[in-house]
């Protein structure tokens, strides 16, 4: 909705820039793609070439890939199971790995911590046992088993102390003594897939309805446009809230997960359908479409062989930029307690713990799940922006 | 243009009805209602006959046992004939008496941030466009990128934490506690004005960032037009070229999306209100959804959507006035 119009790169400003512009206009092969090579490249190869030139876009893309890899290998990367409770380590603060012990350099290690209640019995104070450094080991065996990539049961974890009496929580623990790093990694699975699945549904719905609306016109078009207007008459977050509150309380967390995905996509397809309709209206009268029709092509053929493929470029951009919006939607709903329900964990569910100021002041590390959310959103925005530039150049 | 505005108004009325229908249906979706809960509670306590009777009366009045379309007709009929939006069962008050002050504060917060958004975004976008590729542009664009990426509720949380740690002050509510239940007075207005800027600014962040980018893009498009080159070639000052020739054109898309920036502001202010405890419609909606207080929630959905529709109407008319090149027929 807030897509800025494609920017023209013609510089206007300094005299030097204007001279450069004139020079560029005088030289025929001013385009950055050399003409000979470009001739033989497919459209996708061209997009990829241009995308690779954007540093921010490539950085965003790399981060996105890493994030999804971390979600796939969440079990292996996290030191503990997300729901494993350490009753002796409730609200334990984060501990960074240390290198210096007794004045000497050592392989990275942590000190075991233990909690003691204050005299009034209201707070826990953690103290470190600085006599017994526990080295951080790689490929350790954990207590609880998990399924590697959801298939192979194992207890092997990438790192940890490997000692049950001295667990290490790099990002601290929550009110039930659960390792926050492990919970963030597993929460990513839910948050990141909600983005993908939600946008997939939105894109399919939006494309089908948008193409139908633009291609057939008439009554179909009118009905669809009024429907979209109706949908867009509600501010998004209140509408999400009302729909999410309608999910029955006795649903399992998996059902709720799909419920939330459905809500986010049902509310979100309108804008996309409008843009697709606009594109279809523009291409509907193109010569090649008329040629196909006069050659006797069916509606189905025209729509799926000609019209839909012509929107691919736009769809990629719109979808990429819609993913962070969907992830934020889930995060906001879960943060309010209307979204994903435990035992399932998402970044929003984790942030729900940090809803009260009192809690944040006492245990500031509970705000850490905000970081992956921000990282994801920024990475997707960079990628989407670079994609837009890469794909729009030919238009 | 007169006929365009008239036609626009004629769409507005059926839209309001459609919106009210959708609001009502959504609110009816969850199984059970506040009344059902209350009945179960009362029965568990042995059933106080008079209050059970009261509930029966309510049920009859709003046709709660009737099919949903009949309930809707009764609801909308009540609104149209008597301005009766139903009863808030959780607050034990007519919705009518409850919602207006909350809606007023919604308008106040969203309106303030709307003004902020436009006051900030237009000059910033123009500066970034004129200084394209220079450090000024990079700084403005970079900040706007961050502003677009940070979700509203995180901004609000961050504000709470920063305020508490750095200033030892809690950015909560629109009034100091001593004014909560006081009637309106000059002192209360001053207190409100003191509390208003911070939440309004938080609501404005996302909108400003997005609008600024659009302003920058639109300005860049206009600056590439031949008539700008002509204006410069005939020796007009930069100020005249940018301020008069370019800005006048570049601002049209900004006005045309005025209506579109409203949903963002209303939606953003809803979640910020929940985090910062502002007495606005979003906050009340959240509370009413949690207690399944259906008439209250339905009315609030309807009102929020109506606000949006009115906003869109105004922005469409504004565009018709500002950009005479657009023909409406």
Image (spheres, coloured by chain):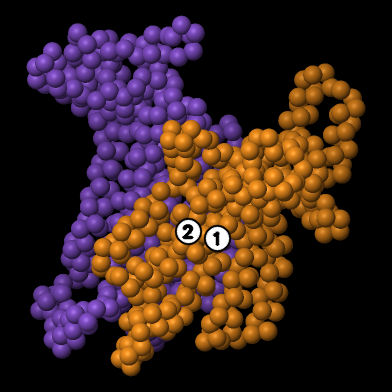
Chain colours: A purple, B orange
Q: Position of residue A200 (x, y in %)?
A: 40, 54
> Which one is earlier in the sequence, the residue at label 2 or at label 1?
1
Q: Residue B317: percent from the left, percent from the top? A: 62, 76
Q: Label 2, on which residue?
A: B207
Other residues around mark 2 within 10 Å, as few (<14) / some (14–19) / many (≥20): many
Chain label for disc 2: B
Badge number at residue B114: 1
The front one of B123 and A224 is B123
Tell me: A224 left or right of B20. left
Chain ID at mark 1 = B
Tell me the residue at 25%/10% (across/down): A129
Q: Is residue A39 visible?
A: no
Above or below, A208 against B101 in this view is below
Foreground residue among A123 and B75: A123
Image quarter where the C terminus of chain A lies is bottom left
Quadrant of residue B179 in the image? top right
What SS does tag 2 mark? helix
Identify the residue at image location x=43%, y=9%.
A118
Rendered image quadrant of residue A57: bottom left
Q: Tell me which residue sits at (38%, 75%) in the image.
A: B219
């Amino acid at each position: 909705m807030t897509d800025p119009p494609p920017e023209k790169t013609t510089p206007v400003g300094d005299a030097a820039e204007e001279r450069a512009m004139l020079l560029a206009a005088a030289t025929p092969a001013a385009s950055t793609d050399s003409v000979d090579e470009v001739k033989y490249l497919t459209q996708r190869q061209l997009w990829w070439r241009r995308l690779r030139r954007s540093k921010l876009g490539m950085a965003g893309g790399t981060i996105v890939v890493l994030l999804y890899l971390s979600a796939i290998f969440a079990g292996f990367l996290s030191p503990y199971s997300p729901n494993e409770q350490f009753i002796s380590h409730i609200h334990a603060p984060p501990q960074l790995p240390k290198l210096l012990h007794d004045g000497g350099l050592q392989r990275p290690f942590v000190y075991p911590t233990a909690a003691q209640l204050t005299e009034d019995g209201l707070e826990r104070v953690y103290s470190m046992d600085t006599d017994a450094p526990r080295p951080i080991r790689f490929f350790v065996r954990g207590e609880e088993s998990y399924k590697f990539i959801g298939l192979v049961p194992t207890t092997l974890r990438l790192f940890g102390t490997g000692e049950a009496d001295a667990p290490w929580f790099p990002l601290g623990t929550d009110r039930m003594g659960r390792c926050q790093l492990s919970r963030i990694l597993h929460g990513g699975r839910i948050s990141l897939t909600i983005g993908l699945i939600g946008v997939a549904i939105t894109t399919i719905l939006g494309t089908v309805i948008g193409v139908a609306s633009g291609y057939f016109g008439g009554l179909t078009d009118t009905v669809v446009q009024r429907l979209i207007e109706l949908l867009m008459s509600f501010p998004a977050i209140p509408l999400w809230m009302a729909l999410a509150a309608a999910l029955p309380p006795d649903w399992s967390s998996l059902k709720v997960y799909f419920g939330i995905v459905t809500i986010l996509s049902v509310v979100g397809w309108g804008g996309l359908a409008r843009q697709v309709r606009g594109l279809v209206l523009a291409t509907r009268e193109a010569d090649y479409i008329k040629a196909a029709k006069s050659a006797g092509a069916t509606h189905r053929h025209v729509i799926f062989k000609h019209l839909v493929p012509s929107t691919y470029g736009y769809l990629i951009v719109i979808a990429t930029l819609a993913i962070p919006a969907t992830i934020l939607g889930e995060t906001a709903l879960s943060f309010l307690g209307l979204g994903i329900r435990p035992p399932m964990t998402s970044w929003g569910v984790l942030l729900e713990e940090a809803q009260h100021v009192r809690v944040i002041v006492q245990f500031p590390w509970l705000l850490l799940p905000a970081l992956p959310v921000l990282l994801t959103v920024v990475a997707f925005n960079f990628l989407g922006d670079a994609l837009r530039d890469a794909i729009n150049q030919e238009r | 243009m007169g006929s365009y505005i008239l036609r626009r108004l004629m769409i507005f009325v059926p839209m309001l009805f459609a919106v009210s229908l959708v609001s009502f249906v959504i609110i009816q979706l969850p199984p059970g209602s506040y009344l059902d809960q209350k009945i179960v509670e009362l029965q568990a306590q042995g059933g106080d006959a008079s209050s059970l009777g009261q509930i029966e009366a309510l049920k009859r009045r709003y046709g709660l046992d009737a099919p949903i379309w009949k309930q809707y007709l009764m609801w909308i009929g009540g609104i149209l004939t008597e301005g009766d939006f139903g009863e808030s069962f959780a607050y034990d008050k007519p919705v009518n008496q409850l919602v207006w002050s909350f809606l007023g504060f919604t308008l106040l917060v969203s309106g303030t941030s709307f003004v902020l958004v436009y006051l900030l975004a237009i000059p910033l976008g123009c500066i970034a466009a004129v200084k394209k590729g220079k450090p000024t542009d990079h700084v403005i664009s970079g900040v706007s990128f961050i502003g677009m990426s940070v979700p509203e509720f995180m901004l609000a949380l961050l504000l709470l934490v920063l305020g508490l740690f750095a200033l030892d002050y809690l950015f909560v509510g629109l009034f100091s506690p001593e004014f909560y239940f006081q009637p309106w007075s000059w002192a209360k207005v001053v207190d409100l004005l003191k509390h208003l800027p911070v939440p309004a600014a938080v609501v404005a962040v996302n909108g400003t960032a997005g609008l600024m980018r659009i302003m920058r893009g639109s300005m860049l498009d206009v600056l590439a037009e031949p008539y700008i080159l002509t204006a410069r070639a005939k020796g007009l000052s930069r100020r005249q070229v940018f301020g008069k020739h370019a800005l006048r054109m570049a601002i049209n898309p900004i006005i045309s999306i005025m209506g579109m920036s409203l949903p963002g502001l209303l939606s953003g202010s809803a979640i910020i209100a929940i985090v910062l405890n502002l007495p606005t419609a979003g906050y009340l909606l959240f509370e009413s959804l949690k207690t399944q207080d259906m008439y209250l929630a339905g009315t609030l959905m309807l009102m929020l959507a109506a606000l949006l529709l009115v906003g869109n109407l105004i922005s469409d008319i504004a565009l018709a006035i500002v950009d005479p090149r657009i023909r409406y027929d």
